[in-house]
Image (spheres, rainbow, N blue to C red):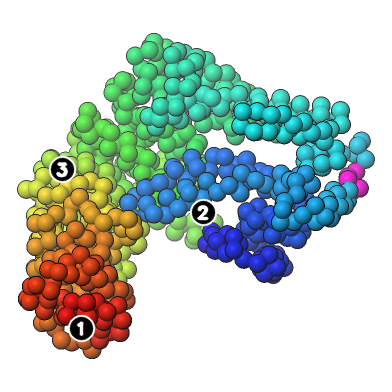
Amino acid sequence: MALEKFLLELAENADAEVLVSWLNYLLEISDSASISSVVTSVVLACPEKTFDIAKILFRTREFIIHDTHRSVSEQGAKTLYSIGQKMGSSKNNIYDIERLETCENKHRKWNLESLCLNYQVFSTHESGEEEAKKRQEILWNILNDYYSKLPPDSEQNEADKTWRLFLARMDRRKMSIKAEETDEGISIEFKPEIDPEIDAFREETQKVYKEHMRYVPLKLWADFKSKNDDKYKEYERYDSNPQNALEDVKEILEKLNEPYNPDLSQETYAENELFHLFNNQIPSCVCAVLVEHYIDKLNDEEREFCKGIIIAKVASCVQPNYVYQVGDGVQEAIASLPKLMDLFPKERQTIKLLLLLILLKDESVGGIMSTERFNIFSMVAIHKMWEKEFDNAHSLLLGYLVLKPKYNELVDESREKSFEDGLNGFDLGELLDRFLIDNEMNLNKMFDNEFSISDLGNIQELELFILSNALKMMPTKLHFKEHIAIAHEIISKFARELTKGRDGDNVEYMVRDEFLERYAYLVLNSEIKEVPQLIQPFIDNFNSTEPIAEMFQKFIYAEDRMHSYDNFWFVWNHFKDKMVELTNNGWYVDKIIKSYLFAQTHWNDSKKEWDSLKVINMRLIKDVSEHMGQHPSVLYSISKLLNDIGSSFYADGLIWVSNMLSRHSEYYTSKLEMNTSYYLENLVRRYVYEEREKIKKNKRLKQKILVVLNFLIEKGSSVSYILRENII
């Protein structure tokens, strides 16, 4: 979090007393565990400066326990953070990198438990031997206090015994130390003296833990294989013989499917729950991998087994009581349905029904994918079908457009009725049954691929989020005439709705964002002959509203990933005339200009060129400078562009800037966009340093550069004054 980063940066050079006073203040005034964790992070990063805070933390047993759990969980933090890396668009890349870099911080490998031991064993030059002894006495008093509060051995529960293990690992007095010289230096081993009954408890706990973790290699193999990560090769037992994976899956299912026994002890019941938590998702993940990658090595019986597991898992997610959790195996199972459809033609009706029902689920999946809804999993599966199962994918697309409005009407009706009856909700199971019965004819048309575009009626009367989802379901490249027609209708509806209000707030933000992102990818991925039809609705409805600026942003981010050079500049050139027509009267003119001229894009600081920006494209930038030079946002945007991805063209660009300043004297008195002078100063300084002799010899060039320097001097630039003196 921001506070942690701020404190860590300051702590390195801050005076110890000042740092301790800050941290102590945070602990005193805050009731937040998050703030306490930030304080702990700073203590671990700067232990010598913060002992007075560390001893406060050591007096709270819960801090020590939870921080140990934190340090263990952080071993997988880098993998967890990587799951969401670049999800959506490249504009988040800078944040992804920053988040991943935090995993490399040395202090994250420490915890309060290890720090307590470290204070007792080692002294530093900063603290000295006497201070180290004082710290030992303070820590031993804290530990003695913990020992005194333990209940008698006969009354100790599992938590007390676990805490005794913590104390044994933290108390230097109850340890034997063994030093050994190795190739890398001196290795010091700390061996705690653990009471026999506690050691027996530890061994029993480890035995239970190992049983729960027994199938982790199987889970890791399936995860790595599904992501095409070469680490799957490390699990040769499963890779060389997938039947071994099936055998382990059957063992897991046998344990998971044990009937409920009310006579089980609470401890045994808790262990079974833990086994379920660790292993419930493994069967469907493994079967999905076997179907996708090892189908040729499976016999008919094994294929049937995998099919049953996958379909049962997917069916569970359309039940009324289902709540999605990341890693529950449903995502992998849904993704394998297209393969099952190809392998088992008789199951097509079942699979298509499941995919449709998932499409109807609009709830957020939460977590790092909180911007996505649950139906994204069905859409991903449908995208896999366009190549080999085109007719079935097309029928699902049309079926969604026909049946989703009917499903929503039924939900609204049920919700209204439950409200009238004084109920808090309605029975989703009954609603689904009614939906299937009421729409049996349309469902059969979908199963038999008999839907046509004429069944859709007026597409533009449908709700926007339905239309946005339909666009997301379509193939990444449109060839089919019906798809092009549907896409054009959807785009036309959005173009009108998004440009009605100045903020576009008549369209839900997430729907708007998802549509614009998908729209940009769709246009850039289409045949160039189809592009004019796809962009015409936004050209016709072009105005100075915020969604127009957002649209340009989405195109830039999409192009940064797709490299569809011809389509991108076709779009940019066709919007140029509309940009020139912009006036200063609109609310978002400045933001639109900045977006169009790449100044609103968050480029990396080190990025000084862009593959999609070539010499020929700079003609458009020049035209904009000539026709829109009166806008301060144009001056700012071109200056910024020439400092980052357009830096290769800065010499020509500086002349365009000079011409703008010469034509529009109002710049000398008007308020500039923030950092305009900074960017201009960088440009002219670089040019003067590199081309000083050329400037002195070329009178016309000197006049052009002097226009920029004089302008900056008027704005208070002392650097520009010195530069001017160097070339006069």
Which residue position is annotated with label 1?
Answer: 710
The part of the image, by quadrant, that contains residue 437 is: top left
Q: Is residue 91 left or right of residue 104?
A: left
Task: Say what secondary structure mark 3 lies in.
Answer: loop
Residue at the image position 18 percent from the left and 77 percent from the top: 727
In the rendered structure, which amino acid carries the disc numbered 2? Answer: Gly
The kind of residue on which mark 3 rests is Leu
Using a 10 Å C-alpha cutoff, classify the residue at mark 1 as few (fewer than 14 neighbours), some (14 to 19) or many (20 or more): some
The disc placed on residue 478 is 3
Q: What percent of the width, then of the height, locates residue 415?
A: 45, 56
> Label 1's element?
helix
722 is higher (above) or lower (below) than 163: below
Magenta residues, start to end: 147-151
Q: Residue furthest bottom?
A: 669
Spatial distance from mark 3 to mark 1, Cα to Cα?
54 Å
Q: Earlier in the sequence, mark 2 or mark 3?
A: 2
Disc nearer the start of the sequence (3/1): 3
Q: In this rendering, does residue 233 appear at all?
A: yes
Picture layout, residue 404 above or below residue 53:
above
Q: Which of the two discs, 2 and 3, sits closer to the camera?
A: 3
- Give the side of residue 579 with respect to residue 211, left or right: left
Tell me if residue 611 comes above or below residue 545 in the rendering: above
Residue drawn at 30 percent across, 81 percent down: 717
- Rendered-image quadrant of the C terminus: bottom left
Q: Residues within 10 Å of mark 2 (few under 14, many from 20)?
A: few
Q: Secondary structure at mark 2?
A: loop
Q: Which numbered dot is residue 199?
A: none
Q: Which mark is residue 425?
A: 2
Q: Could you tell whether 229 is left or right of 451 in the image? A: right
Judging depth in this view, the residue of 120 and 702 nearest the camera is 702
